[in-house]
Amino acid sequence: MSSNELTSLLTTILIAMVFILFFLIMIFVFIKLKNDKKKNIQSQGENRTTNTATQGYDKQSIFNFMEFDKIEDNMIIQKNGTRYLMVVECQGVNYDLMSGIEKTSVEEGFLQFLNTLRHPIQIYTQTRTVNLEKSISTYKSRIDQIESDLRAKEANYQAKVKSGRYTKEQLDKEFYELTKQRNLYEYGRDVIYNTERMSTNKNVLNKRYYIVIPYYPEDLGNTNFDKEEIKNMAFSELYTRAQSVIRTLSACGINGKILGSNLLAELLYVAYNRDEEEIYGLDKALAAGYDELYSTAPDVLDKKMKELDKQIEQKAMDMANDAIIQARSDKQKRVEEKEKSMDNLISQMAKLIIQENKSFVGEDIAESALDKIDGTEKQENIEEIEEVAPPKKRGRKKVTLENTEEGGKVNDVKEKKKTTRRTTKTA
């Protein structure tokens, strides 16, 4: 090898080494810059986290985290009004239980649905745990109403049976209606019992199917419209698309409906709260103030005032019930006393009636009637005394009476009767 060739070879090797060294230096600089940029990003993230923790969350930070801005006019508005969504809920069909002809018709209808699409759609499936608490409470209130109707019909039937003014056909008809009501009540109780037992042992799942239809205002081309006009045009276009989807899906035997604002809020709530939605539904979340940034407890004095009002109302009810019971007992005592003295009052009133009508019935008849009333009273008094403590010397009294009648002391007895009668009249 000549010296010139050796020189050229060394020069080539040197140039190659210079290029390799330059390439390595460039790689080193690139890696260095990349690491510095990564460190800057991390430091900025830490500063942002510190500032966020110091300042707290607000509505805008929450909206930035979510993928939607708000729900308005049955639409989900995203990205500051640059995208609008309308959701159609579809009722599923049991494809496996269909016959061959029915499956073919469903497939043809779905093919027609796909061919008529002129805009993008998204099919969304959501699995929910069915909370039967609200349904069971509603059903229990209905069963309570059925039970009250049953008790009223039972009382009405017993009253008709005791009155004896109804025919056998009428009673049989009433008993038939009563039996129907009783069977309905027992069936309702069985349904509640089985439903509660089923819901406690395992979770009841339900699948719901949705078609999400988007709309982009930038498709209009002209952007000289204000936000209200864009929103109205978006609603009109989305409503037309949703109705077209519902109409074409009906060929498959699938029924659909456009979700309103409340149902859209429930859909998003379930999507973002998978764990809590089994315990707290949307209605409970709104009632608890989940849509607010913070909540405050009620004033202690207000709570104490409410408790005092409850105690006053409860004690007033107790006092009123005691007073009513006492009044009823006093009235019942007066009724019992009057029942005990009813015979005496009847006799006194009968005597007054005879005295007032003495001129019409005659003096002798009136005196005889009064003597009979007095004799009846004495006989009743003797029977009462015998019931309490029977007299030991009943024979002596009988002899005394006979001797009195034989001895001619009838006038004295009459005088005593007259005296007794006049005293009673004066009283």
Image: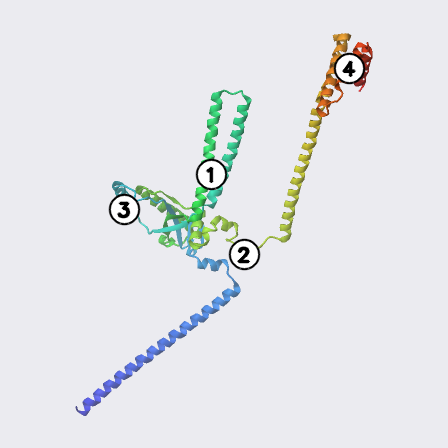
Does the residue at mark 3 contact the one at mark 1 (Cβ under 8 Å)? no
Residue at the spot of label 3 = 111
Report crowding for label 3: few under 14, some 14 to 19, many 20 or more residues within 10 A (C-alpha).
some
Identify which residue is drawn at 46% across, 42% down: 193
Lower sequence index among marks 4 and 1: 1
| Mark 2 secondary-structure assignment | loop
Q: Residue furthest left?
A: 1
Does the residue at mark 3 contact the one at mark 4 (Cβ under 8 Å)? no
Amino acid residing under circle 2: Tyr
Identify which residue is drawn at 40% across, 52% down: 84
Q: Does residue 335 sit above or below 226 in this rendering?
A: above
To which quarter of the image does residue 243 belong? top left
Report crowding for label 4: few under 14, some 14 to 19, many 20 or more residues within 10 A (C-alpha).
few
Q: Is residue 383 left or right of residue 212?
A: right
Residue 378 placement (x, y as % from top left): 75, 18
To which quarter of the image does residue 392 belong? top right
Amino acid residing under circle 3: Leu
Question: What separation in Å lies between label 2 and label 1 (alpha carbons)?
Answer: 43 Å
Q: Is residue 123 left or right of residue 186?
A: left
Residue 72 placement (x, y as % from top left): 45, 49
Q: Quadrant where the C terminus lies?
A: top right
Lower sequence index among marks 3 and 1: 3
Residue at the spot of label 4 = 399
Question: What separation in Å lies between label 2 and label 4 (alpha carbons)?
Answer: 105 Å
Residue at the spot of label 1 = 189
Q: Front-most of 46 and 340?
A: 340
